């Protein structure tokens, strides 16, 4: 936030400074910075300590009703991990160990399924996930449910929404949102015309009508991985700006906007609409943390939790977990 000033040889000797004025300006500046704890920091805080099997991409984490945590992430047939304490993680296998042939038309017969969204409702786990190939919007979002979340227990509930090359959106990166009135929505999208939202039928988890709402966008620029989290009087729309999947050269960063309505309009801290490219940065690359993004958020007993992937110096994607705090204006920050 500072600019280095260079004085030329012709610069005259400095004049006396009004120390009272300087002191007053410093006080005002420090007070302003206190309202923006994340942005004021020279660098962002590092991820919290995690151990065990922490290799992950596009993680989604939820609390298990019988204790511990379940994580789903991008991988062959959707990878799964469990943790008893949000610190130690172990791999448990894949959601579909026998494969997911209903997705092959969108993956060119590949097995990699993307960006699952995991949550627990009505006595079972719901998992929305995407099938596509890199750089294409011939894509689809599917739903699966499971009573336990264990590998091999997931039942395919069918196609939720798809996109084709003739569409102006991309049906990947799903996120289930249950609003304060109990209505179900699906937040999704990547590049093209940005982030979209559709209504879901809570009874089936599938699409309720034909309407598609626009939630955020960068005029075709890189925006994806939407996640809406309700806290207090606001719905917070988290998104990832810029580019993932390039190892330590990835430029992903996590942005946020908010709205009092789940369907928007969402604006950033400066009042810029997310549909007009707005977004307030809360986490970006720093030190040996490269390209943090692909995030999800959930409320735990101690804090609201941000989980995401980032790349190590050697390009390995790893699990990142941080606490979320809220400043006096209600804007989230990572610590």
Image (tube, rainbow, N blue to C red):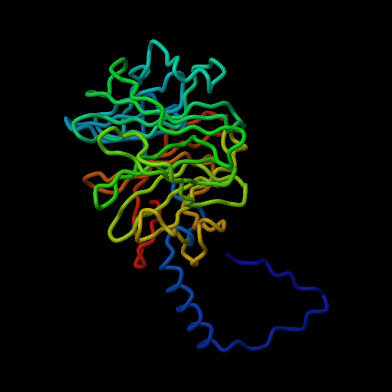
Q: Is residue 286 visible?
A: no
Up-down relation of residue 205 to residue 18 (above or below): above
Q: Residue at x 59, y 35 (%)?
A: 248
**Residue closest to the eye, 124 or 9:** 124
Estimate the x, y position of residue 60 in percent, counting from the top left: 37, 35
Estimate the x, y position of residue 69 in percent, counting from the top left: 27, 32
Quadrant of the snapshot with the N terminus? bottom right
Estimate the x, y position of residue 170 in percent, counting from the top left: 54, 37
**Furthest residue toward top:** 98
Up-down relation of residue 295 to residue 70 (above or below): below
Q: Is residue 249 visible?
A: yes
Q: Residue at x 50, y 35 (%)?
A: 171
Up-down relation of residue 128 to residue 197 (above or below): above
Question: For residue 141, what is the image quadrant?
Answer: top left
Question: For residue 9, what is the image quadrant?
Answer: bottom right
**Residue closest to the eye, 264 or 291:** 264
**Furthest residue toward right:** 10
Estimate the x, y position of residue 214 in percent, counting from the top left: 49, 51
Q: Count the marks.
A: 0
Using residue 6 as the reference point, say whether residue 310 is left or right of it: left
**Residue closest to the eye, 170 or 248:** 170
Using residue 323 as the reference point, say whether residue 14 is left or right of it: right
Q: Residue at x 28, y 32 (%)?
A: 204
Q: Residue at x 25, y 44 (%)?
A: 300
Up-down relation of residue 189 to residue 229 (above or below): above
**Furthest residue toward left:** 66
């Amino acid at each position: 936030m500072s600019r280095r000033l260079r004085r030329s040889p012709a610069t005259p000797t400095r004049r006396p400074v009004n120390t009272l004025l300087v002191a007053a300006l410093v006080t005002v500046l420090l007070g302003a910075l206190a309202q923006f704890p994340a942005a004021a920091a020279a660098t962002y805080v590092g991820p919290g300590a995690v151990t065990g099997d922490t290799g992950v991409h596009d993680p989604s984490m939820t609390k298990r009703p019988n204790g511990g945590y379940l994580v789903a992430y991008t991988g062959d047939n959707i990878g799964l991990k469990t943790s008893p304490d949000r610190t130690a993680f172990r791999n448990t296998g894949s959601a579909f160990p026998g494969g997911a042939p209903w997705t092959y038309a969108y993956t060119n017969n590949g097995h990699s399924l993307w960006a699952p969204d995991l949550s627990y409702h009505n006595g079972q786990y719901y998992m929305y996930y995407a099938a596509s190939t890199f750089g294409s919007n011939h894509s689809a979002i599917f739903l699966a449910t499971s009573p336990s979340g264990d590998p091999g227990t997931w039942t395919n509930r069918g196609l939720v929404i798809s996109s084709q090359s003739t569409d102006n959106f991309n049906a990947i990166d799903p996120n289930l949102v249950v609003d304060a009135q109990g209505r179900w929505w699906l937040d999704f999208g990547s590049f093209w015309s940005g982030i979209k939202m559709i209504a879901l039928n809570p009874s089936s988890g599938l699409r309720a009508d034909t309407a598609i709402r626009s939630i955020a966008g960068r005029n075709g620029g890189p925006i994806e991985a939407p996640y809406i989290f309700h806290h207090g009087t606001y719905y917070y729309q988290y998104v990832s700006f810029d580019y993932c999947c390039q190892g330590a050269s990835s430029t992903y960063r996590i942005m946020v906007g908010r709205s009092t309505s789940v369907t928007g309009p969402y604006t950033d801290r400066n009042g810029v609409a997310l549909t007009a490219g707005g977004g307030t940065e809360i986490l970006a690359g720093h030190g040996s943390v490269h390209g943090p993004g692909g995030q999800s958020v959930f409320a735990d007993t101690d804090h609201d939790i941000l989980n995401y992937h980032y790349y190590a110096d050697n390009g390995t994607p790893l699990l990142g977990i941080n606490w979320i705090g809220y400043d006096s204006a209600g804007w989230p920050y990572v610590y």
